[in-house]
Image: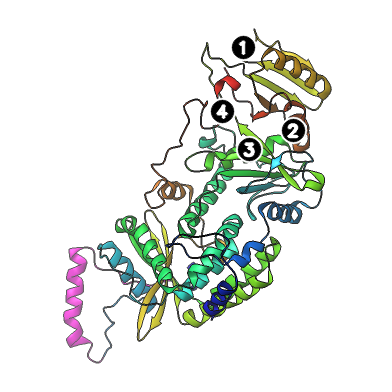
Amino acid sequence: MLAREMPTKRVRRPSSPALAAALVATLACVGACNRGRVVDSSLPRTSPAARTADSFVHCIETGTTVCVAAGQLGGGWDALHILLWLADGSPVAILEALPRELAAHTDPLRVQAKLVAEVDRYGAALRGAECQSVATRPLPGLVDQAADLATKRLQRLGLWRKELETVVRGLQQEAHDDLDEGHLVRIDCSYDPYRVYLVTRPHEGRIHVVGMTTVLAPAFGGDVLDRRSVQARLSGPSLGLGGTQANIQEDTIDTWLRFPLEEL
Amino acid sequence: MLAAALASLLALMAPAQPTSADEPEPVSGFARLPGFGALVLAHAEASLGRDALPSGTGVPLEPGLFVTIGLERVWAFDREVLALRSGAVPEGTAARECAGLCSTALFDAMRAFWLSLAIESTQRATEIPARLAVVADKRVPARTMLQVVYAAAIARPVRPPDLALVVTAGGRGLQAQPFHLLAPAGLDIDQGAAALGLRLRFGRDRYELDAVDERYVQNERLTDLRRLAAALAGVKKRYPNKTAIVLEPDASVTVADLVAVIAAVRAEFPRIVLAAGQPID
């Protein structure tokens, strides 16, 4: 499970004047009393992937317009995201949208635009959501698990075709090529969207966030939100459903009986 | 590279239909993917077994969320959302949102499922399903089916979905019997409204026909479907513009019984409204 893989450890900052004074005294003693000892780094004790993910969230929180790095680094995540979708998404949506999604996958600009759109969608919510990384997970295992479950599910649903085998294997290979040194970082938030999963990968000496999603199926280590959080997500602004009201035609009885009262 | 493989696929296959300049062209080779009916049938046979669905005729099945109800489990698409006990929803706290018609566990499971569909719709540019197809084992109690359908319908954001019960029509494959649900809190018909409010409360071999206003339809107790059909033909003669009937099965009724009753009444009253004992006044 993702949460158990690699919990992120953090150094808490002093929260009271007394504790701060004690720390100052301790620090003053360090020079004289602890010569030769190694002093901890002031950086949080998190993995580089988690620090990158936290920085990415902070970038969004500060309202910076461009948090997504330029470049064509997202193909591997897009491949993995399609595999996760095939393994757990709506089969009706798969029937409808798979050809379109695969066509879009061949265009790096569209792949990058998807990440930009996802960041835009949740940008406003993340600004007040009190988010922090809690776990990281290496990606190669997830890639193979997603490909395996996608294959078995498509076979079970009667959707399996020869060309789909080519597609699944190709997506799996592409995800491995791009993400074998990458990580999935789970971010927990106190408010909507509650969970954010960021995908990081190294490139030219730096770690980049190349993917984002707010849902991960339990089969892949995601958890099920409690009822309060589910309701908050459905009524929050990110999904655009909160203020939407059913359109009731004037001559119908109610939202349940959508035919004229005279017919009852 | 997958991209190269897909590009060659795209080059080989002409797009199924013209697309706008902003939309990527679909990989049209996947037009050979099966249709919705085949998908439902594959899942029904895998989860319920062969010949588990009620027999009947209906209208063509249209794509949407399908909820499968067996004697031991409930699935939304192919994801298990609740375990049943011999066809019954385990007792538990009633969900406030369902006005007592479904359990909290069932409602929460369906609500979380709709959330996953809502998130998917933003990621894949699809619509949240507006239809719900009920794929129920014919032995399942109709009351269990109603609890599941109420939970799924109330939990959907924005508005309840359009509903249909899936039946197997012999050589014609799967078909849909459309139906409505009475609002969870019941129906309050204004005095003077032009509504007859015809209602059939029934069990096995026991049919009780009445209407909101008893001046128009006397309470009739019948013992078989033939007499019921004849009684309904009489009502229809007097009220030819009425098309809807409220069906209220008791705890003895199975999904197969319900389908048989629907078949008997829909010739005269094609708009089927299912209810679970809510008031109509």
Q: Which stretch did the figure color magenta?
A: A7-36
Q: Secondary structure at mark 3?
A: helix
Whichever of callouts 2 and 3 sits on the residue coming sooner in the sequence is: 3
Instruction: Tell me, yes or no, whether the two marked residues, 1 and 3, touch with CB atoms within 8 Å.
Output: no
Amino acid under label 3?
Gln
The answer to whether residue A254 is left or right of residue B29 is: left
Badge 4: chain ID: A
Q: Nearer the viewer, residue A115 or A251?
A: A251
For the C terminus of chain A, which image quadrant?
top right
User: Which of the chains bears the disc numbered 2?
Assistant: B
Tell me the amino acid under the disc marked 4.
Phe
In the rendered view, does A192 fall on the left or right side of A101?
left
Return the residue at label 3. Answer: B147
Could you give the CA–CA distance between mark 4 and mark 1, rounded to whole angstroms? 20 Å
What is the secondary structure assignment of the residue under circle 4?
loop
Measuring from the top left, give residue A183's x and y in whole percent: 45, 76
Q: Is mark 2 in CB contact (under 8 Å) with mark 3?
A: no
Name the residue beneath numbered marker 1.
B213
Amino acid at the residue labelled 1: Asp
